[in-house]
Amino acid sequence: MISEVNFVKGFLSFWDIVVPYMKQYIKICNLDIETFNPVVDMQFYANSYKSLSAELAFRIFCKESNDGTQSLTPQAIKCIETETCKYIAQFGDVDPAKLKVGEEERREAMWLKNNLIRFFKDVWKDESQIITNPFFVGCGILDHSWGDIIVGDTLFEIKAVDRNFQAPDMRQILTYIVLNYASKSYNIKRICLLNPRRCVFYWDNVNNAVARMSGKSFDWMVNETINLLSSGDLSK
C-alpha cells in the first residue's frame, strides 16, 4: 500500500498522464483567487513555527466545530497542543519532547482558527454541517486517508501557508476525489483551496476543474486512475 502523501508527492509520470494541464490550471487558480478580510490585521512573528501554528489552528477549529463551541477549556487546548506537537515531529528532525507550542505559535494559531471561522460563517455561508477530517476509503494500492473539510457538496483543502497554491495542493484534493468516486461516500460536486493565512480561496466545479486539468472528461480521469491503482501499474 502507498500513502496519500507518497501518491501526491511522487508518481509524477502518472500525474503528467492523467492531468497534463495541471500547471496551467494552477496558474489560473492563483490569478483568479478570491479574498476575504482577516479577523484582525496581525504582524506575524519571524521566528514562529509556521507548520506548528497552522496544524494547531486546524485541530482547534475541528474540535470546536465538532463540539459546537468557540471556547474550549484550557485543558482541552493543552491536549490539542500536545497531540499537534507529536504529529508535527513525525515530519522533521525535531525531538517530540523538545517541540512545544510557544506564545508566538499560540497567537498565530488562534488568529488562523478565527479566520477559518469567519470564512465559513461570513464568506461561504453554507449552513450545512461542517464535516471535519472526512474519511476516504482506500482503493487498490492507495491506502485510506482523511481530507480536511466538507461542507454541503464542497470539499475544502486547507493550506495555511505563506505562498501561492501549488500543484501538490491540487493533486491532494484530486486524490480524495478519486477515492470518493470509488467509494461513493460523499456527494462532492465542488472543490475549494482555502488559505486562512493569506485569506484567499479558489473554488471550482469538480467536472470543470478535472476537464481543464486533464483535457478529457471527469469520468475518464477518475476511471483511468482507479484502473491504474487497482492494477498496481503506476509509474513514478
Image (tube, rainbow, N blue to C red):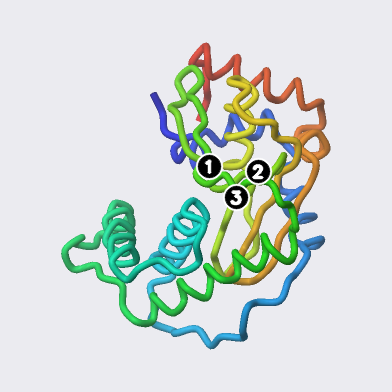
CA neighbours of label 1 inside 10 A, class few (<14), some (14 to 19), many (20+): many
Residue furthest top in the image = 231
Residue drawn at x 31%, y 64% is 81
Q: Residue 85 is drawn in which quadrant?
A: bottom left
Q: Whole-Å distance between the Cαs marked 2 and 1?
A: 8 Å
**Residue 69 marker:** none
What is the spatial separation of the Cα atoms under label 2 and label 3, in whole angstroms? Answer: 7 Å
**What is the quadrant of the N terminus in the image?**
top left
* Residue at position x 57%, y 17% in the image: 228
Q: Earlier in the sequence, mark 1 or mark 3?
A: 1
**Which residue corresponds to the image point at 53% horizontal and 42% vertical from the top-left?**
147
Q: Are marks 1 and 3 in contact (CB under 8 Å)?
A: yes
| Disc 1 residue type (three-letter) | Gly
Q: Amino acid at mark 2?
A: Leu
Using residue 43 as the reference point, say whether residue 86 is left or right of it.
left
**Residue 62 location, x and y as percent?**
48, 54
Q: Position of residue 216 (x, y in %)?
A: 81, 27
Vertical relation: 131 (above or below) 17:
below
> Is there a contact, CB below 8 Å, between mark 2 and mark 3?
yes
Q: Which residue is mark 2?
A: 155
Residue denoted by label 1: 147
- Residue with the mark numbered 3: 157
In the image, residue 219 lies at what x, y percent? 76, 21
Judge from the rendering whether residue 85 lies leftward or rightward of residue 163; answer left or right.
left
Element type where label 1 sits in the image: loop
